[in-house]
Image (spheres, rainbow, N blue to C red):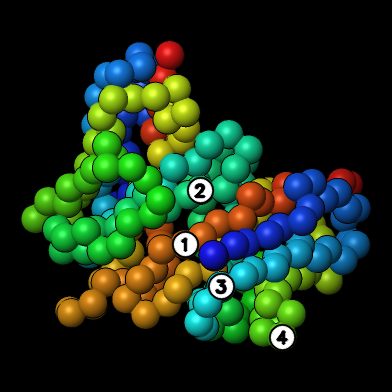
Amino acid sequence: ETGVTQSPTHLIKTRGQQVTLRCSSQSGHNTVSWYQQALGQGPQFIFQYYREEENGRGNFPPRFSGLQFPNYSSELNVNALELDDSALYLCASSPGGAGVPSTDTQYFGPGTRLTVL
Amino acid sequence: AQRVTQPEKLLSVFKGAPVELKCNYSYSGSPELFWYVQYSRQRLQLLLRHISRESIKGFTADLNKGETSFHLKKPFAQEEDSAMYYCAPSPGGSNYKLTFGKGTLLTVNP
């Protein structure tokens, strides 16, 4: 069973640029959540995707957007990067039921470290 | 507003000593409660969730709804327990957003 994978591992961008981060969910999981973890802080919820639809969003501006694909992999896109966007971005997947998003444990990927200069 | 407080940023104990990592939450409804752990150079992983009432690696956590606390305990700490611990409530139902605390870095000294 393959765990959650994320790419790239590290990324350096400049202010104003756009970035796309990728996540492959664990086999059999149809729910993907994204979190932002700033240095010294706990992860903060960005949004969750279930069966290609957004299912809940945290307190992040619209320039943070996402996608989930039919194979349940997911992308996080951030436009107009700001210095404060520098953080570790975590993706987590969980198994879902037939009609509702997962109520189970979230399995985390290793994260993508984004640095905005 | 949903809020999670882990009052100790750092906690240091000696091997064999009891350990308690505190977590207080302010959450509407009946949240589900989780503890996640991150060992050095490893990814964040679930340690335990209150609904399962399991003891994982000797850790237990008691939900006190009156005090809105979910403290993590272990009677005899081991060196391999050294890690960052996060308390994380979730609204439950069809919304499994986790609200993480800032974490407590536990160091178990030999």
Quadrant where the C terminus of chain A sits is top left
Chain letter of disc 4 in the image? B
Residue wearing tag 2? A43
A90 or B92: nearer the viewer: B92
Distance between the alpha carbons at the discs numbered 1 and 3:
12 Å
Find residue A62 and report its image quarter.
top left
**Percent position (x, y) of residue A54?**
21, 59
Q: Residue at x 86, y 49 (%)?
A: B12
Q: Label 4 to label 2, Cα distance in Å?
A: 26 Å
How far is disc 1 from disc 2 in space, using C-alphas?
9 Å
Query: Of label 4 and label 3, which has the lower sequence position?
Result: 3
Between label 1 and label 4, give the one nearer the viewer: 4
Q: Residue at x 62, y 70 (%)?
A: B26
Give me the C-alpha separation between circle 1 and circle 4: 21 Å
Q: Which residue is mark 4?
A: B66
- Please report contact status of discs 1 and 3: CB closer than 8 Å, yes or no: no
Q: Secondary structure at mark 1?
A: loop
Q: Could you tell whether A92 is left or right of B31 in the image?
A: left
- Asked which secondary structure carries label 2, the reply is loop
- The amino acid sitting under disc 1 is Leu
Residue A14, position in %: x, y? Answer: 35, 14
Q: If you read the primary sequence from the N terminus, does the residue marked by circle 1 or circle 4 appear first?
A: 4
Tell me the CA gap for discs 3 and 2: 17 Å
Q: Which is closer to the viewer, label 3 or label 2?
A: 3
Residue beneath disc 1: B98
Q: Residue at (54%, 65%) from the top-left corner?
A: B2
Q: Chain of mark 3?
A: B
**Crowdedness of circle 4 by 10 Å Cα count: few (<14), some, many (20+)?**
few
Q: Amino acid at mark 3?
A: Tyr
The answer to whether the residue labelled 4 contacts the one labelled 3, judged by CB atoms less than 8 Å apart, is no
Numbered-mark total: 4
